[in-house]
């Protein structure tokens, strides 16, 4: 059953939550069943992140994710979601080539993916793009700090903003994004003091992932949070359960049952 429009979390709720000091919860997730579970328990927002490249498609990084991949998984998440704000992620090459193409790609994520907002990585160099996307009615979530589509420029997945000049650049980027009209921004892998400073100096909410506890909200990737992924974990990941271990045990028991002919027993057969 679809909710009334008034019950759906919107970008306006993000701003209100910051003003009222209510923390925003966000999870990066990519599939219908997971979306359904986390929406039903009341997550505020689901980002269909391009980390789907590693966690679902088995790629080494996010650079192989295409706009079609992003649209397909955003559709799946939208089908399982009633209440949470759904944000589609703009993958590598879907932005940065030309403003026209980028605006159209953002539009496709909304129209075909059925999300309500898009996320775009980058700072000062993305201002014109953000304004163009926003001008056709698409809310944009910014993303600065360790932005994975720039991994080859960073020389790996490294904490950003440690040097004074980088700290100043990130603070400037955050303010420029705010002026360009983003409804919030992800701060990834930066020192907590910088996360706090940016959060205090801008009016839109910051969503931290490895940016400390002072951000207005937090995002984690579902596969990391439930211990399903075996990609090397950064310091900021908290694993709440070891799903790999649960799956291993279940499948091992099933295999033993089949080998010993104890499955299927009478209750699992037809008369
Ligand atoms: O792709 C993703 O899942 C993300 C989050 C980690 C912010 O960008």
Image (cartoon, helix red, strand yellow):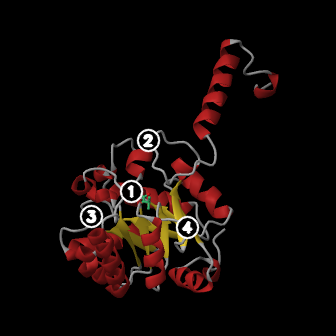
Determine the image quadrant of residue 49: bottom left
- State which tag comes first along the sequence, 2 or 3: 3
* Residue placed under numbered mark 2 in the picture: 231
Label 1 and label 4: CA atoms lie apart by 24 Å
Viewed as shown, does residue 81 lie left or right of 179?
Answer: right
Mark 3–mark 1 distance (CA, rounded to whole Å) = 12 Å
**Residue 149: where, in percent of width, then height?**
29, 58
Q: Say which residue label 4 marks.
A: 213
Furthest residue in direction top, as rendered:
260
Q: Categorize mark 3 by other alpha carbons within 10 Å: few (<14), some (14-19), many (20+).
A: many
> If you read the primary sequence from the N terminus, does the residue marked by circle 1 or circle 2 appear first?
1
Can you tell me which quadrant of the image ligand 1 is in?
Answer: bottom left
Residue 125: mark in rendering: none
Where 174 sits versus 156, above or below?
below
Q: Residue at x 65, y 74 (%)?
A: 3
Label 3 residue SS: loop
Instruction: Find residue 270 and report its horizontal and vertical position in percent.
Output: 77, 26
Element on which disc 1 rests: loop
Q: Earlier in the sequence, mark 3 or mark 1?
A: 1
Looking at marks 1 and 4 on the same chain, the residue that comes earlier in the sequence is marked by: 1
Spatial CA span between label 1 and label 2: 15 Å
Disc 4 or disc 2, which is closer to the eye? 4
Q: Quadrant of the N terminus?
A: bottom right
For residue 94, the mark is 3
As drawn, the residue found furthest toward the left would be 98
Report which residue position mark 1 lands on. Answer: 50
Asked whether the beta carbons under mark 3 and mark 4 sit within 8 Å of each other, the answer is no
Q: Nearer the viewer, mark 3 or mark 4?
A: 4
Front residue of this view, candidates 121 and 188 = 188
Q: Compute the Cα span from label 3 to label 4.
A: 32 Å
Asked if one can make out residue 210 in the rendered structure from this viewpoint, the answer is yes
In the picture, measured across the screen, residue 218 lies left or right of residue 124, that is right
């Amino acid at each position: 059953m679809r909710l009334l429009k008034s019950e759906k979390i919107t970008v306006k709720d993000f701003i209100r939550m910051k003003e009222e000091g209510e923390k925003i919860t966000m999870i990066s997730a990519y599939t219908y069943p997971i979306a359904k579970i986390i929406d039903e328990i009341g997550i505020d927002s689901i980002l269909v992140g391009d980390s789907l490249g590693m966690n679902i498609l088995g790629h080494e990084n996010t650079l192989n994710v295409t706009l079609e991949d992003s649209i397909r998984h955003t559709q799946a998440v939208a089908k399982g979601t009633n209440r949470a704000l759904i944000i589609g992620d703009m993958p590598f090459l879907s932005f940065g080539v030309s403003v026209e193409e980028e605006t159209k790609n953002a539009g496709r994520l909304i129209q075909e993916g059925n999300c309500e907002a898009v996320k775009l990585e980058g700072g000062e160099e993305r201002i014109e793009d953000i304004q163009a996307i926003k001008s056709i009615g698409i809310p944009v979530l910014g993303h600065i700090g360790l932005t994975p589509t720039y991994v080859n420029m960073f020389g790996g997945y490294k904490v950003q903003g440690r040097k004074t000049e980088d700290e100043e650049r990130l603070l400037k980027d955050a303010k420029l994004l705010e002026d360009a009209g983003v409804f919030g921004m992800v701060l990834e892998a930066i020192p907590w003091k910088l996360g706090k400073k940016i959060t205090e100096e801008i009016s839109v909410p910051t969503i931290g992932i490895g940016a400390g506890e002072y951000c207005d909200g937090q995002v984690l990737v579902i596969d990391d949070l439930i211990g399903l992924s075996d990609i090397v974990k950064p310091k900021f990941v908290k694993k709440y359960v070891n799903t790999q271990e649960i799956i291993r045990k279940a499948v091992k028991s099933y295999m033993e049952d089949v080998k010993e002919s104890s499955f299927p027993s009478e209750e699992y057969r037809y008369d």
